[in-house]
Amino acid sequence: MGRSGGGPAIFFVVLVVVAGVCNGQLQVGFYSKSCPAAESTVASVVRQAAAADNTILPALVRLQFHDCFVKGCDASVLIKGGNNNAEVDNNKHQGLRGLDVVDNAKAQLEAQCPGVVSCADVVVLASRDAVALTGGPSFDVPTGRRDGKTSNLRDADALPDVHDSIDVLRSKFAANGLDDKELVLLSSAHTVGTTACFFLQDRLYNFPLPGGGRGADPSIPESFLSELRSRCAPGDLNTRLPLDRGSEDAFDISILRNIRNGFAVIASDAVLYNDTSTVDVVDSYSGLLSTFFGPYFREDFADAMVKMGSIGVLTGGAGEVRKVCSKFN
């Protein structure tokens, strides 16, 4: 992921109703007494980082996804092992950014409230704040996560991959308690940000063709294929281009309309329009009437983010609260 949104946005709050306890022992306002400035501190650090480089915003959302989809939201992706055997060293995490922002926020929180706020919660809070700063919805997230005590290279093999078929994607999301609707909604985070040509090489030049041989993905419209190839030449791994063609700076449903119309940039977005279960979800949000009669994309996206943030959480006496996010206590 890369650059993020510029223009003015209408912010609104999606309220998460919590009756005392939510998702085990997660609770909105978990730190209200133990570290009252926890959430505002994280928000301030994210704003400062975005002011210096707004491409960090979609990167922070991606960071939460990569943490939560590997053995739950436990900050295991932040651990630096030193022997290239930590989770973060897996190639599935290639290009992962935002760890320094989390470290900065955590250092400030340790100065205010030593040993109280977990790194896992900082990841989720920073992602939530990044969504709002890209022009997306503002919403409450429950906190109270604890940090994991393991981080293994091979665990990250379970992450969704840009080459995954729709069946594989559905299976990986279902394994984390997420349904087809949430698969589409969380993929819609690609409404802001960029991708490297590295992730398009196979789709543009080495895609397995039905009759044998390899070439371009035949589902790509000819004019769009020419456009993509002009941006990503054979062997070009580093050039970046928007994930949401024509609307990379705005948090909106353009990404879903692009997917519906054949203009998805990466293969894992394109396959969302290959199966009735996800086609129906894409169509339900990308229709002209959904803005007025629902389903409501912004509210549902916020709900999906909250649900993702509850995957495999450690609470109570489980895990630990790290002093430094990159190493175990």
Image (cartoon, helix red, strand yellow):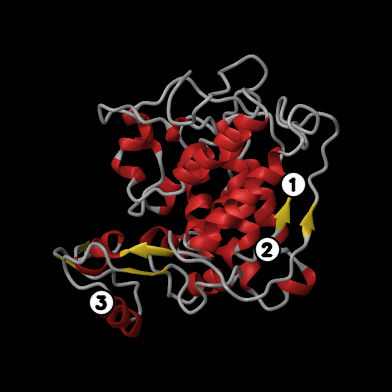
Residue that lies at the very extreme toward the front in this rendered image:
111
Residue that lies at the very extreme toward the top in this rendered image:
317
Residue that lies at the very extreme toward the right in this rendered image:
19
Instruction: Give how far apart the Cα atoms at labels 1 and 3 are.
Output: 41 Å
For badge 3, the amino acid type reads Arg
Identify the residue shown where x is 43% and y is 53%.
166
In the displayed structure, would residue 151 be above or below residue 184? above
Q: Which mark is residue 229?
A: 3
Specify whether 227 is left or right of 325: left
Relative depth, front residue between 302 and 34? 34
- Which residue is under mark 2? 297
State the image coordinates of residue 157 (x, y, percent, origin top left): 34, 36
Relative depth, front residue between 15 and 133? 133
| Among the two numbered marks 3 and 2 on one chain, the one whose residue lies closer to the N terminus | 3
- Which residue is under mark 1? 140
Instruction: Give how far apart the Cα atoms at labels 1 and 2 are.
Output: 17 Å
In the displayed structure, would residue 28 be above or below residue 137? above
For badge 2, the amino acid type reads Phe
| Among the two numbered marks 1 and 3 on one chain, the one whose residue lies closer to the N terminus | 1
For badge 1, the amino acid type reads Asp
Q: Quadrant of residue 282?
A: bottom right
Q: Quadrant of residue 218?
A: bottom left
Identify the residue shown where x is 59% and y is 47%.
126
Q: Nearer the viewer, mark 1 or mark 2?
A: 1
